[in-house]
Image (cartoon, rainbow, N blue to C red):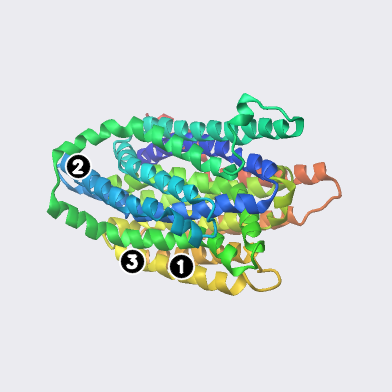
């Protein structure tokens, strides 16, 4: 159990930085949704970040996970790190230059001909993030969670401060200057042609600062380059690239398809609504991403221990419990959480419960995916994700342009849930064949059933009083917590550990 306690502690450190940082970053959602009242404007931002997500996968091509794997198996860790750094540096430069050179044609193809600078800023964000990826991975491998968390926090704080300065302060002064016929210092710093593009500028500045803080890690590049080692790392990593690309189709491609499968103007507007409402489901994503930062090196380091599979099973149970707590905590309080986004965007709120469950399934899938990462069978992960991507694309093409309940972003949300659920179930059965882990399936299904039942009990309760409904729904959340405590008996476990000591 000491291993689980260590994992929980590291997840907490990663989680504090990720949760606090994301919550600070989440403040940009109401800022954008209230300041940019037209969903189409926020839709541009959402679309570009969907492309950025794809390119981040291409530029890193699975080398982060490959680094973890080879650092744990090779004796010369410095050579592993240096080889990966050199390869990443060269490939990043080679991939960045074409985008900068072809910025205008790319902007034309995306129907943003007036903003080729958006393409340049976006690709530079990808470039700086890629160059920081391996140093960040090394911090995780060395269990330097505090330094990792501090730099990540700084990134988000700079991003938010710069964004608020331009979009909040300077834009406000600019609009007042227009009304009053005056000229102010702050108003002169705002360019209305850039508009939502200031989000890219802020992100780029924040990423550049963090890269500067990690530059000293590039001194280890002097240890050299081992071509044979790189070839082995590449063979291990390339299936993960396919996995990553297919994963991005599952995660963000619906936001791109909405623009092109719906009538002109309507598509971009729905992208903005969908993107804003998806942010409400952010706590689920924050939790499992924070967990991933700590869990990936933890799973690799514990693989050779006799009790490792029992630990993985216990971790899964606790993971599901925390995900369900986040699901109920968010949905039972949606009546006031909805005011975090502008009124023009709240029409999309029905996607929130669907996306919360979808992200929970994705987190469970990540836990299950240890079987193909630890056994080196990454090709299975590739095929699982490709199948998920095919399902996502098929359902989006079927539902987005349809009529009725599944039209537009609602169809995209359900396609995401079905995709991740399918991947989760398939991964479990395949994993039990090649790397059996004694997961407590009856208990997991029991918790899932309880969580969904409590959700419907709260969701369909209407007393006629907003306050009474809110109190009742939070009592439902408390009931879930009490049941978990009675079943898991964490206090009894802590007491027994103290007695042992």
- In this picture, residue 364 sits left or right of residue 477: left
Name the residue furthest top: 185
Camera-near label (1 vs 2) is 2
User: Which quadrant of the figure has residue 164?
Assistant: top right
Residue found at x 30% / y 65%:
379
- Please, what secondary structure does the residue beneath circle 1 have? helix
Disc 1 to disc 3, C-alpha distance: 12 Å
Q: Which mark is residue 215?
A: none
Q: Position of residue 321 (x, y in %)?
A: 54, 49
Q: Position of residue 428 (x, y in %)?
A: 42, 64
The tag earlier along the polypeptide, 1 or 3, is 3
- Please, what secondary structure does the residue beneath circle 3 have? helix
Residue found at x 51% / y 31%:
157
Q: Position of residue 89 (x, y in %)?
A: 26, 45
Residue found at x 31% / y 38%:
135
Q: Which mark is residue 380?
A: 3
Q: Which residue is mark 1?
A: 388
Q: Is residue 393 above or below residue 132?
A: below
The tag earlier along the polypeptide, 1 or 2, is 2
User: Which quadrant of the figure has residue 380?
Assistant: bottom left
Q: Which mark is residue 82?
A: 2
Camera-near label (1 vs 3) is 1
Disc 1 to disc 2, C-alpha distance: 35 Å
Q: Residues within 10 Å of mark 3 (few under 14, many from 20)?
A: many
């Amino acid at each position: 159990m000491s291993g689980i306690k260590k994992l929980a502690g590291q997840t907490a450190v990663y989680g504090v930085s990720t949760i606090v940082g994301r919550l600070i970053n989440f403040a940009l959602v109401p800022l954008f949704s209230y300041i940019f009242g037209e969903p189409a404007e926020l839709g541009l931002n959402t679309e570009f970040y969907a492309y950025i997500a794809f390119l981040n996968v291409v530029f890193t091509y699975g080398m982060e996970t490959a680094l973890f794997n080879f650092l744990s198996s090779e004796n010369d860790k410095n050579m592993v790190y240096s080889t990966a750094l050199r390869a990443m540096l060269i490939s990043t430069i080679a991939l960045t230059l074409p985008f900068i050179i072809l910025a205008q044609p790319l902007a034309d193809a995306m129907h943003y001909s007036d903003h080729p600078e958006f393409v340049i800023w976006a690709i530079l964000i990808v470039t700086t993030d890629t160059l920081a990826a391996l140093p960040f991975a090394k911090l995780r491998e060395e269990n330097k969670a505090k330094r990792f968390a501090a730099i990540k926090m700084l990134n988000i704080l700079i991003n938010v401060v710069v964004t608020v300065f331009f979009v909040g302060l300077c834009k406000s002064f600019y609009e007042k200057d227009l009304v009053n016929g005056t000229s102010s210092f702050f108003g002169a710093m705002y360019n209305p042609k850039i508009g939502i593009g200031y989000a890219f500028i802020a992100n780029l500045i924040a990423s550049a600062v963090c890269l500067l803080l990690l530059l000293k890690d590039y001194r280890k590049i002097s240890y050299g380059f081992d071509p044979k080692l790189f070839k082995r790392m590449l063979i291990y990593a390339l299936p993960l690239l396919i996995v990553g690309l297919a994963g991005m189709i599952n995660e963000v491609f619906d936001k791109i398809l909405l623009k092109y499968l719906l009538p002109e103007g309507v598509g971009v507007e729905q992208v903005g609504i969908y993107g804003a409402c998806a942010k409400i489901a952010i706590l689920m994503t924050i939790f499992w991403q924070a967990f991933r930062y700590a869990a990936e090196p933890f799973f690799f380091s514990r693989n050779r221990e006799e009790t490792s599979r029992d630990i993985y099973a216990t971790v899964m149970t606790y993971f599901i419990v925390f995900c369900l707590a986040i699901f109920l905590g968010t949905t039972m309080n949606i009546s006031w959480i909805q005011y975090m986004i502008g009124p023009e965007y709240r029409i999309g709120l029905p996607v929130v419960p669907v996306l919360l469950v979808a992200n929970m399934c994705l987190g469970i899938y990540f836990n299950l995916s240890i079987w193909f990462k630890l056994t080196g069978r990454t090709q299975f992960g590739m095929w699982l994700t490709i199948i998920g991507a095919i399902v996502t694309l098929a359902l989006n093409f079927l539902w987005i342009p349809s009529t009725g309940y599944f039209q537009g972003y609602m169809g995209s949300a359900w396609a995401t849930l079905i995709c991740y659920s399918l991947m989760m179930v398939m991964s479990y059965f395949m994993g039990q064949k090649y790397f059996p882990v004694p997961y407590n399936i009856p208990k997991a299904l029991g918790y899932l059933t309880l969580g969904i039942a409590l959700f419907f009990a709260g969701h369909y309760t209407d007393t006629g009083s907003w306050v009474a409904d809110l109190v009742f729904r939070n009592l439902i959340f408390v009931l879930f917590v009490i049941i978990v405590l009675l079943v898991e008996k964490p206090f009894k476990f802590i007491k027994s550990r103290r007695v042992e000591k």
